[in-house]
Amino acid sequence: MESIKIALLGLGNVGSGVWQILQRSGDQIALRAGVPLEIGGILVRSVDKPRQVNPDPSLLTTDAYTLLNDPTMPIVVETIGCPDGSTEPALSYILHALRAGKNVVTANKEVLAKHAKELSAALAQGRGGLYFEASVAGGIPIIKALRESLAANRVQALMGIINGTTNYMLTKMASEKSSFASVLAEAQACGYAEADPTSDVEGHDAAYKLAILSSLAFGVEIEIDDIYREGITRITPVDLEYAQELGMVIKLLAIAKEENGTIEARVHPTMIPASHPLANVSDVFNAVFVQGDAVGDLMFYGRGAGSLPTGSAVVADCIDAARSLRSGVRLPLSVPLKRKALLPIEDTVSRYYIHTRVIDRPGVLAAIATIFGEADVSIESVIQKGQHRQDPVSLVFVTHLVKERNVRSALSRIRNLSVVREISNVIRVEGE
Ligand SMILES: NC(=O)c1ccc[n+]([C@@H]2O[C@H](COP(=O)([O-])OP(=O)(O)OC[C@H]3O[C@@H](n4cnc5c(N)ncnc54)[C@H](OP(=O)(O)O)[C@@H]3O)[C@@H](O)[C@H]2O)c1
């Protein structure tokens, strides 16, 4: 049987995984796709670079458009990424291939999150499909689950640990009681964090992925800048200890909810009960917790990165693309078309952990509690620890469910009290 040829753009971590899987499981993949899949050419920056895998050198090229325009390669796999912080040239290559009617498989969350509209237009222009299982949570099949397996559900909420670097760091900080800076240095030494860790630790990476998940879950187009985003740089070992004392853990969560047609999407450090299914997702592992109106609670867990796990998702997409080519049935356009504004963060409702540093003096607790009361912020619990009247001391509050606007209004007054040295941290509490 004649094979279907793939133009592979990029032969780094993910591209090498794709190559390896196609080599070692070619027979099984051919059975599943109904046709053998073969790499027809590979785009790289440097053909001479030593690599983890060694395809025939004649396959390597630095000429993107010769590959993209080759009519014998109806599937294009993009694993270039955004190496210099730019979505180019990956975006142009994907758009070119889609307009030419090719089936494009990509692992590039940033291109998908920032350019949904252009991708949608290019898809409509061509006759191919856009497949992106590997763009969120690496090897975890969450895209297909949302797009196909949960199609009968109205997704009410999803919460995910979808950035392995920050999950590794928060796990280490909690278990070793280490600071953010020392764990970051360790993560960089192990290759879990980039030399410039901004995208991970400030939550950009998780926000790109949340934009993709939310658009699939709720069928809308979400502007990446509308997603509220806070990173983990302000989390301290002290907060992690308080979390433990409260029976909770701190995770960087990507959260999206839909209620009465209103959608909220946010990425921030979150306290969740130690008994929550996401609480035990440690180290570089990822997980996505989904609540559907018919199916109830679901949890998807696995490796969110790595050459073979991510390659597994890319090759599965290639198999789907090959099936579509053989059957002539096009994948329905999956990039949403309707733009939807998100609920402003001030209008979202959550519980809050509020860590203040105050002068240890009678009446301080009452003064703060009065302000919370006046702002309609009801307090669930308080932890007060003072050692030999050494000022300032920590005073920690956990609120009941309350609108963020009320918390902000109370904190702006509490911050001005003469006995309050600082509001050290405010962390949203979810998951009950
Ligand atoms: N790494 C993971 O575990 C993982 C997980 C999920 C999703 N992803 C996504 O997968 C994509 C690829 O990630 P990666 O880790 O595999 O990246 P990578 O290791 O840096 O590999 C990038 C590859 O693209 C090639 N390349 C880069 N810029 C190019 C250009 N301008 N022209 C031609 N070729 C170019 C590089 O060529 P040279 O080899 O010649 O330098 C390299 O082979 C990204 O979008 C990433 O977000 C990665």
Image (tube, rainbow, N blue to C red):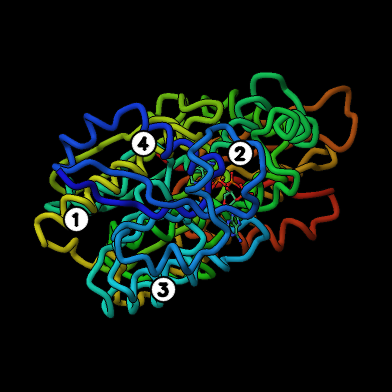
Dots 1, 3 in contact, CB < 8 A: no
Residue type marked 4 = Ser
Residue type marked 3 = His
Element marked by disc 3: helix
Q: Classify mark 2: residues with Cα within 10 Å, few (<14), some (14-19) or many (20+).
A: many
Residue 173 in the figure: left or right of residue 381:
right
Comes first in the chain, label 2 or label 3: 3
For the residue pair 338 and 270, the one nearer the viewer reads as 338
Q: Classify mark 3: residues with Cα within 10 Å, few (<14), some (14-19) or many (20+).
A: some
> Which is closer to the viewer, label 4 or label 1?
4
Residue drawn at x 72%, y 56% is 414
For the residue pair 329 and 62, the one nearer the viewer reads as 62
The Cα–Cα distance between marks 4 and 2, rounded to whole angstroms, is 23 Å
Q: Classify mark 1: residues with Cα within 10 Å, few (<14), some (14-19) or many (20+).
A: some
Element marked by disc 4: helix
Residue 188's label in the rendered image is: none
> Which is closer to the viewer, label 4 or label 2?
4
Dots 2, 3 in contact, CB < 8 A: no
Locate the N terminus and report the quarter of the image it occupies: top left
Residue receiving disc 2: 166
For the residue pair 178 and 273, the one nearer the viewer reads as 178
Residue receiving disc 1: 154
For residue 217, above or below residue 95: above
Q: Is mark 1 within 8 Å of ligand 1?
A: no
Residue receiving disc 4: 312
Residue type marked 2 = Thr
The Cα–Cα distance between marks 4 and 1, rounded to whole angstroms, is 28 Å
The Cα–Cα distance between marks 4 and 3, rounded to whole angstroms, is 25 Å
**Residue 407 in sight from this viewpoint:** no
> Residue 156 at x, y = what percent?
26, 53
Residue receiving disc 3: 96
Residue drawn at x 43%, y 50% is 135
